[in-house]
Amino acid sequence: MTLQELYLILLVGGVVLLASIAAARAAHRLGLPSLLLFLGVGVLLGEDVFGLHFDNAALAQSLGTAALAVILVEGGLTTQWSDVRRLLLPAGVLATAGVTLSVLVTAAGAHWLLGMDWHLALLLGAIVSSTDAAAVFAVLRALPLPQKVTGLLEAESGFNDAPTIILVLVFSTAAADLPDPVHIAGNVLYQLVVGALLGLAIGRLGAAALRHIALPATGLYPLATVGFGIVAFAAGGAAGASGIIAAYLSALVLGNAKLPHRAATRSFAEGAGWLAQIGLFVMLGLLVTPNELPAAVLPAVVVGLVLLLAARPVSVLVCLLPFRLPWREQAFMSWAGLRGAVPIVLATFPIVAGVQDADRLLNIVFVLVVLFTLVQGPSLPAMARLLRLTRADALRDVQVETAPLDLLDADLLTLTVPDRSRLHGVAVFELRLPPPTVLTLILRDGTTLVPRPDSVLRAGDELLLITTPEVRDAAERRLRAVGRRGKLARWFGETGGPLPHRPPAE
């Protein structure tokens, strides 16, 4: 590669990146999932429009898997353990038994309605049965839903990639005879267990290292944190286990370990996740041939309707029956089984394996993802309101960030008083923060104020507090408690802990 060629590649890459960012903003203003416009950028760059030729399915598979690892690391780092710890069992059931049921129902629909042979139908069912972590993280976190619903969907999307990848690999490499179900179950169990153990071990090791080793620059903490997640992914894959599970769980441990510079780490991880999503969707848009897509519309609609109206509801109903979730939550989870990059990446596996009609599967999956993302994504807020699942107090919670003051063995807490928060109108002395925590500075409308005990907080204020590691958690809980119930939070029994699940009103 010459220097001039490098400049050209960087120029094209930079323009594509900026165009994708502009597309993300346009998608947000239009209420559309950004992945659709990213895919559109890739299709426009392709050979049928601007003429950029890309048909390397093996490269797309490798880069796509690596991008999924980055996206899952970002998802784990930004997931609250308190939101998902009680949901691991139902999420695990959905990610295993639920995926199996979804594969079988979808395959039956493809076989009987489209005339596909069972081998190809099972392969298609496995490809489309995984909910997409990137789509779930991006869409659901913007909705004021009960934490149980959001946490369960996020945990499921983080876990169910591994079983579907295993099933797709098994069906792609199998001959005409279907593989032994006992062999498949053993393979899935090994990959999930070993991948989970590796992820937890590397996450704990990374948390211990970052907590006790002082790095010379703030920017190294986010790099090291994300680096541990990537190491877990690679270690899982090298051990023949699920690197996807390992990456997600290691990041979940690291993201909830109260590490230094949590805000910087979260921002870096979100940026890396966005970059991975943009690169992934643009590449997948390049991979398809637009003039072949019209023939895939009818089978994509049929398979998508079977998946949305039968396979997903059946898997949710059967798997969550022992956990007695309200029917409204089950209905929303059935509708919120978003598909995105994962099925399109998985559709490259049979192409690489040389499966007959694999290109047809890629086109069907691509059209299915586009059409049903257009239907499901924008409809989720209306569906949540229809099922009365929106949580009125979601906008009033306080998010507290931490940065270390190493020389003082103290922590600097920063927060912004949200609109409609009960912190508005509270005097500083009424906060009753645990000693030696002290509010040191208020930034209001661009002006710096040194607070007095009788200074009154307002919505939009940025607060800086100094505390010690021993009472930091108590200080955060007190701030959240006052933010939810006001200065008399203790009288109302509000402790500032995780919000309890509130069943919807009848």
Image (cartoon, rainbow, N blue to C red):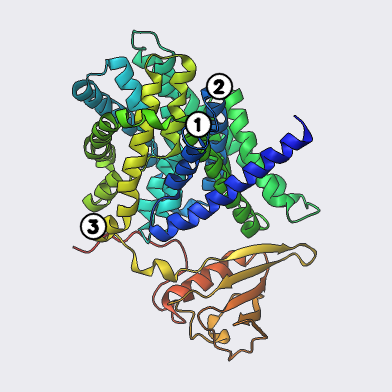
Q: Position of residue 282 (x, y in %)?
A: 51, 39
Distance from disc 2 to disc 3, alpha carbons, whole Å, reads 43 Å
* Circle 3: residue type: Leu
Percent x, y of residue 154: 42, 46
Q: Nearer the viewer, residue 277 or 150?
A: 277
- Where does label 1 land, which residue? 47
Q: Nearer the viewer, mark 1 or mark 2?
A: 1
Question: Residue 24 location, x and y as percent?
Answer: 49, 53
Q: Nearer the viewer, residue 338 or 21?
A: 21
Left or right relative to 460: residue 314 = left
Helix, strand or loop status at disc 3 = loop
Residue 80 shows in the view: no
Sequence-wise, which precedes: disc 3 or disc 1? Answer: 1
The kind of residue on which mark 2 rests is: Gly
Instruction: Please tell me whether mark 3 or mark 1 is closer to you in this view.
Output: 1
Q: Quadrant of the N terminus?
A: top right
Task: Please state which of the two labelled residues, at mark 2 or mark 3, is closer to the viewer.
Answer: 3
Q: Which mark is residue 240?
A: 2
Q: Which residue is mark 3?
A: 387
Please tell me whether mark 2 sits on a helix, a strand or a loop: loop
Residue shown at 40% from the left, 27% from the top: 362
> Badge 3: how crowded within 10 Å, few (<14), some, or many (20+)?
some
